[in-house]
Image (tube, coloured by chain):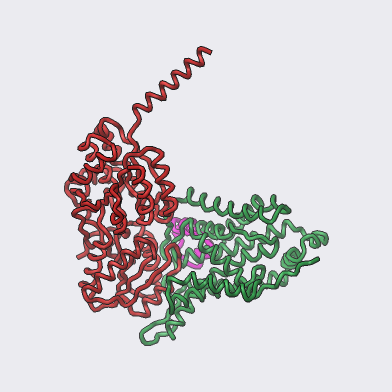
Amino acid sequence: MAYALQQLINGLTLGAMYGLIAIGYTMVYGIIGMINFAHGDIFMVSAFIAVTAFTILAAADVTSIPLALTFVLIVSIFFTSAYGWAVERTAYRPLRGSTRLAPLISAIGMSIFLQNSVQLTQGARVKPIPPVLEGGIVLWDAPGFTVQIGWSQMLIIVTTVILMTAFTWMITQTPFGRQQRACEQDRTMASLLGVNVDRTISFTFMLGAALAAVAGVMVTVYYGVVDFFIGFLAGIKAFTAAVLGGIGSLPGAMLGGLLIGLIESFWAAYLWAEYKDVATFGILCLVLMLRPSGLLGRPEVEKV
Amino acid sequence: MKKTLLATTVLALGGFSTAAMADLAVAIAGPMTGQYASAGDQIRKGAEMAIADINARGGVLGEKLKLEIGDDACDPKQAVSVANTMVNKGIVFMHGHWCSSSTIPASEVYVEADIPMATVSTNPQVTERGLKNIFRIMGRDDQQGLVAGSYIAEKFAGKKVAVVDDKSAYGKGLADEMAKAMEGKGLKPTLRESITAGEKDYSGIVTKLKQAGVEVMAYGGYHTEVALILRQAQAAGLQLTVMGGDTMTNSELVTAAGPAADNVMFTFSPDPRKNPDAAPVVEKFRAAKTEPEGYVLYAYAAMQLFEQAATTAKSTKYADLEKAMRGGSFKTVIGELAFDAKGDQKAPGFVVYRWQGGKYDYAK
């Protein structure tokens, strides 16, 4: 029981991170109907920005952890959003209105570009940072097994819950959210009614990047090491989460992320850890066979 | 018209003369980029220093050596294409590759092209396939698994031990050998697990180890994953001692794992830095601000092996080199090298080391 609880905490932490990245995929898909394959690498870039920010702070002798985390989050969100904006501007906007395949290829190219440029400028070695948030609290001292939740795990779960709440509010209640949903439903009609479609799309990319930046900072704090390759696996898993939850649906992305995190840790806990990925993708196949549009996705209605 | 003709002739002559005075190309290949790039870096530094020294002595058979560097990123597919490139460049000797899973497919290319190779890959299959061109200047996983497994069975008798690998050719082979040796000495592993290399989250496996009350983890795989497992074990309140293989010599383990690296033990050939004959070379590396740890001196020794074999054979032709390497005994910075019929080093020997405060030394 205690063991299961500990694995639940591990799974939720992992799932929260997948969810944060998955939202970037799902939002972009929702609004322009393409898979932004460079999103995983945007996440990787944000982790590198976080490492740089931490290094600067260490050099400046900042020891207050809340202050340091806030600073790193702000810096990382700012620069990563700029990356998100620049990627959309250079790689996707010129291709809007061309075939569906063109931006997809462009996205793969962008992903390779980001990966290689980070590898060349930052080196191929892993970049470690010293532990930032050490320790945690003991939740339950069961006989034979103590359930612990680390401060960094708590930080990840709490931040994700806060962000999700704020995000849902923004999409459902604010003028920007209304414009975003309008573009999602019908871009031509939205522009006829005075919505600046290009700006809304740019902003969507920046928002997705900002959430990926939060995930990037969390990964840096939690695992303590980053390298230029982390975007690939995280991107694949997050993309799977988005598809599992129903691509285009925001709560779906979060649900998908959590599910994948939980499947991974429980499968590894009770069955064979080496078949973890087989299980994750096997379940994805099953869900897609039974519900082709994902768990919370709406089936696309083809208008004639 | 005449001028053009003249110019062409001069150019052609120039081309000829460079061809006649061409340097001898020797090569290294390994993970120069990718997640194991720091090992590739060690190989490159060792080989570059060796080539500079050999050229300063006048080269091999009067010809200067030129170093070609191949990057396989430990990817078997890329390793084969690196091998083809190297064959096209006309190399006469190869030191590499590093990952067993790269060395095995790449060696099929080199044997076709009659190129002798010296490798540090430890998987038994490297020399078990009857290829005549492979010489292994490091021990084998069945030997290092035996040393590591026996050490665990003796020093940690009665404790709970888990055997974990990363599913790679090298990692799984080594972990299997360690488990076999432990069982032979009467210590049955509590858990046998595999992980996926390249991930960041190993909290699942860490929790599993904690649940099973495991204190010692025998690990087959590379240092990057060990660093993450140790860090996450510490966060989960699990005191874990790790026993690994030769890949744990990498000091990147210490930067990534922090103080937890002091819990890592591993097997490696006797430290060549302690070899008195190697002292001048070790000094030279330190003067160049390179600590000759891990594979640095092995790469140096591989180039010495080529130099001495070519000098004995008075030729750089494959048949002569192969005969010289198999029959001879070579004095290198990692000690006396001689090979058996399979191409394995005759006196390998593995010793157990332990990381302590950012340096490794023999474990007591």
Q: How many marks overall?
A: 0
Direction right: furthest residue:
A192
Residue at (30%, 72%) from the top-left corner?
B216
| Residue A182 % position (x, y) | 76, 66
Residue at (42%, 42%) from the top-left corner?
B85
Magenta-colored span: A50-72
- Note whether B333 is above or below B175 in the view shown: above
Which chain is green in the rendering?
A
Q: Quadrant of residue B138?
A: bottom left
Direction top: furthest residue:
B2
Q: Is residue B182 left or right of residue A274?
A: left
Q: Quadrant of residue B139?
A: bottom left
| Residue A246 % position (x, y) | 64, 71
Q: Is residue B200 left or right of residue A81?
A: left
| Residue A299 % position (x, y) | 70, 72
Q: Is residue A235 left or right of residue A184?
A: left
Q: Chief secondary structure of the magenta span?
A: helix
Which chain is red in the rendering?
B
Residue A175 in view, yes or no: no
Indicate whether residue A52 is drawn in magenta: yes
Residue at (35%, 70%) from the top-left corner?
B164
Q: Is residue B157 left or right of residue B101?
A: left
Indicate whether residue A65 is drawn in magenta: yes
Which of B140 and A174 lies nearest the eye of the viewer? B140
Residue at (38%, 26%) from the top-left corner?
B18
Which of B264 and A79 lies nearest the eye of the viewer? B264
